[in-house]
C-alpha cells in the first residue's frame, strides 16, 4: 500500500481551474473575461469555513493565514502559465493535495497539468478533479445506478492521474478529503476514513476513488443533506476581488450568485446550464435566494471598503438573474433599497423575452435606480429558423420576429439607463453569410442605438450528456496547438472548438474567421 509519508499531518493544498488553450493567447481577451476562479471558489466555501475552525486540519494547513489562500488558488485559460504556476508552488510548497476544476474543453488541460504534477511529485500527492465536465460524465440515474460517460475522468486508463473524481456538490466533500488525508497513513486507511466522513457530509455528490482500489469505489450520501448556502461565507472573505469590468464603471468587480438553482430554468439544447442536465429549478426558496443575493452585495461592499476601494461593483453569475421570477426580483430590490447606505453597481443576465415582460420591466427599472447598470443577454443568433429551436425564445409563436424583439430590448434598456451586453453563439448551423449579417446588424445597432456596449462571441461546443457516443472523449484540445486557426480563435472567442462542434455543423474556415475578425474589430467593446 502507498504510504502518505510526505503529508506529515499538515495539508499543503493547491487548487486551480484547468486551461482550455494549449498555448499562450496572442493578446488580451476580447471578451468580458474574469481573473477570478468563481466556480472553483464556490466549491471551496466549505474549506473557507473550516479555516476558522481550530479543530480542523484545514486550520493548520498552508491556507490558514487569512492572506494566503489566494496564493494557492488560480484560474488559467492557457496551458503554459498554468504549468509555470504549478512549478513555482511545487518548488516552494511541495503540495500534497491538488484540486482541479474543469469544463469539457478544459479536460485536456486538466490531463496535461495532472501528468506534469505526477511526473514531479509521483504518489506523494493526491489529485482530485471536479467541475462541470465531471458532473456531466459521472452521475446517478433516477433508479440509483451509477453511470459513467466514456469521456470522463473516471475512465480506467486515467486512474494513474486522478486519484479522486468528485461529481456534484463539493463543498463538504473537499473539506472531508483534507480531514481524512491528514488522519491516514495509507490509501486503504484514507479510503475507509473518507467513506465514514462522507456518510455525514452535506450535498448530493459522487466520490469515485481510483488509486489502489480494485475495483474502484464510488461513495455517495445515502440520505442527502442539503447544503445551506447561508451557513457558508462569501468567497471574498478569503479571496481578494481582483477583476475589473470597465462596463461597471471601472471599479474592482466581484462575482455573486444567488444559489437559487444549479443552472438555468431554460433547456436550450446547446447549453450545459440547462435544466435537463442540472435538474429542475426549485422555486420554493427563490425568495430567500433574493435576500441572500442582496446580503452578499452588502458584504462585498464592506470587504471592498476594508481593502481601501472607494466603491464596489458586482456581476451576478446566475444564468438568469433569480431565474427571472418577478416576486424574487421585487424582494431583491426591496432588500437593496432597505440598505440605502450601500451602493453597489452591478450587472446580471436575463433573456430577451423576460426583458419584454411588463411586470419584470417594472422591477428592472427599480433595480436601475438601485445600481443595476448592465444586463448581459444571450441573443445567440439572428437566424429566425435556428432561433425557433432555442428554449429561451419563449415568444417564438408571436408575430414579432426575434430581431425585432432584440431591438425592443435595446430600446427598453436605453430608456432605463442600463447598458447591454450581447452574447452571440456561432456554430449552431447558421451559414457564414448569416454570421456576417448578424455582425452587420450589431454594428448598425451600435451606430443608431449606442448598444450593445459589449459583444461576446462563442462557438458552440458539444457537451458530453448530449452525445453518449462521442468518439473523441474530450481528451484532445478543442483546437490543436498547431492548427492555423488557433491564434485567431483565441483572440475572438471566449469558448470555441473546431473538434467538438454540434452534430452536423462544420468548423469555421480560416478565411471565415478572418472576415469575422475584421467586422468584430469595427465594434465598440467596453470590457
Image (tube, rainbow, N blue to C red):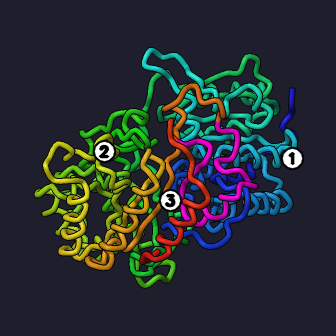
Q: Decide which of tag 1 and tag 2 comes sooner along the chain.
A: 1
Label 3, secondary structure: give it.
Answer: helix
Q: Callout 3: 10 Å neighbours few (<14), some, many (20+)? A: many
Residue 234's place in the image compared with 365, above or below, is above
Nearer to the camera, 396 or 366:
396
The residue indicated by pointer 3 is 235
Q: On the picture, is 369 further left or further right than 172? A: left
Asked whether the beta carbons under mark 3 and mark 2 sit within 8 Å of each other, the answer is no
Q: Which mark is residue 121?
A: 1
Task: Check the picture and name the quadrant holding the N terminus.
Answer: top right
Residue 312 occupies quadrant: bottom left
Residue 174 spot, x, y in % from top left = 61, 42
The residue indicated by pointer 2 is 385
Q: On the picture, is 212 further left or further right than 319? A: right
Nearer to the camera, 519 or 419:
519
Q: What stretch is highlighted in magenta?
A: 474-501
In space, the residues marked 1 and 2 are separated at their CA atoms by 53 Å
What residue is at 34 percent from the left and 71 percent from the top? 452
Amino acid at each position: 500500500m502507498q504510504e502518505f509519508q510526505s503529508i506529515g499531518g499538515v495539508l499543503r493544498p493547491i487548487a486551480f481551474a484547468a486551461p482550455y488553450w494549449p498555448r499562450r493567447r496572442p493578446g488580451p481577451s476580447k471578451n468580458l473575461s474574469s481573473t477570478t476562479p468563481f466556480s472553483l471558489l464556490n466549491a471551496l466555501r466549505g474549506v473557507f469555513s473550516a479555516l476558522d475552525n481550530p479543530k480542523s486540519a484545514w486550520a493548520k494547513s498552508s491556507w490558514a493565514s487569512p492572506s494566503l489562500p489566494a496564493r494557492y488558488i488560480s484560474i488559467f485559460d492557457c496551458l503554459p502559465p498554468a504549468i509555470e504556476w504549478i512549478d513555482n508552488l511545487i518548488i516552494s510548497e511541495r503540495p500534497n493535495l491538488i484540486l482541479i476544476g474543469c469544463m469539457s474543453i478544459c479536460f485536456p488541460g486538466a490531463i496535461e497539468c495532472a501528468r506534469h504534477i505526477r511526473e514531479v511529485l509521483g504518489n506523494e500527492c493526491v489529485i482530485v478533479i471536479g467541475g462541470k465536465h465531471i458532473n456531466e460524465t459521472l452521475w446517478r440515474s433516477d433508479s440509483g445506478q451509477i453511470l459513467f460517460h466514456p469521456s470522463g475522468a473516471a475512465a480506467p486508463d486515467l486512474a494513474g492521474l486522478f486519484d479522486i473524481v468528485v461529481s456534484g456538490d463539493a463543498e463538504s466533500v473537499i473539506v472531508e478529503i483534507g480531514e481524512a488525508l491528514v488522519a491516514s497513513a495509507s490509501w486503504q486507511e484514507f479510503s475507509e476514513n473518507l467513506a465514514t466522513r462522507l456518510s455525514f457530509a452535506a450535498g448530493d455528490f459522487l466520490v469515485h476513488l481510483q488509486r489502489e482500489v480494485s475495483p474502484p469505489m464510488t461513495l455517495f450520501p445515502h440520505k442527502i443533506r442539503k447544503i445551506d448556502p447561508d451557513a457558508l461565507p462569501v468567497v471574498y472573505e478569503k479571496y481578494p476581488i481582483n477583476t475589473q469590468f470597465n462596463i461597471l464603471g471601472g471599479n474592482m468587480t466581484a462575482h455573486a450568485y444567488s444559489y437559487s438553482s444549479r443552472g438555468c430554468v431554460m433547456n436550450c439544447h446547446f447549453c450545459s446550464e440547462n435544466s435537463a442536465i442540472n435538474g429542475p429549478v426549485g422555486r420554493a426558496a427563490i425568495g430567500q435566494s433574493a435576500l441572500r443575493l442582496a446580503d452578499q452585495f452588502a458584504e462585498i461592499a464592506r470587504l471592498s471598503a476594508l481593502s481601501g476601494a472607494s466603491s464596489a461593483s458586482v456581476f451576478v453569475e446566475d444564468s438568469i438573474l433569480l431565474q427571472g421570477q418577478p416576486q424574487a426580483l421585487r424582494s431583491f430590490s426591496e432588500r437593496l433599497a432597505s440598505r440605502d447606505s450601500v451602493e453597489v453597481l452591478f450587472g446580471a443576465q436575463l433573456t430577451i423575452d423576460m426583458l419584454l415582460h411588463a411586470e419584470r420591466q417594472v422591477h428592472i427599472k427599480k433595480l436601475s435606480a438601485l445600481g443595476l447598470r448592465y444586463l448581459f443577454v444571450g441573443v445567440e443568433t439572428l437566424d429566425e429558423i435556428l432561433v425557433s429551436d432555442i428554449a429561451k425564445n419563449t415568444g417564438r409563436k408571436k408575430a414579432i420576429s426575434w430581431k425585432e424583439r432584440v431591438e425592443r430590448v435595446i430600446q427598453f434598456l436605453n430608456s432605463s439607463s442600463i447598458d447591454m451586453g450581447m452574447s452571440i453563439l456561432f456554430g449552431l448551423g447558421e451559414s457564414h453569410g448569416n454570421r456576417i449579417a448578424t455582425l452587420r446588424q450589431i454594428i448598425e445597432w451600435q451606430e443608431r442605438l449606442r448598444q450593445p456596449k459589449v459583444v461576446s462571441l462563442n462557438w458552440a461546443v458539444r457537451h458530453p450528456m448530449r452525445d453518449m457516443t462521442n468518439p473523441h472523449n474530450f481528451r484532445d484540445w478543442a483546437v490543436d496547438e498547431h492548427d492555423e486557426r488557433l491564434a485567431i480563435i483565441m483572440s475572438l472567442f471566449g469558448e470555441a472548438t473546431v473538434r467538438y462542434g454540434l452534430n452536423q455543423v462544420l468548423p469555421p474556415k480560416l478565411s471565415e474567421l478572418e472576415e469575422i475578425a475584421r467586422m468584430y474589430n469595427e465594434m465598440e467593446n467596453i470590457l
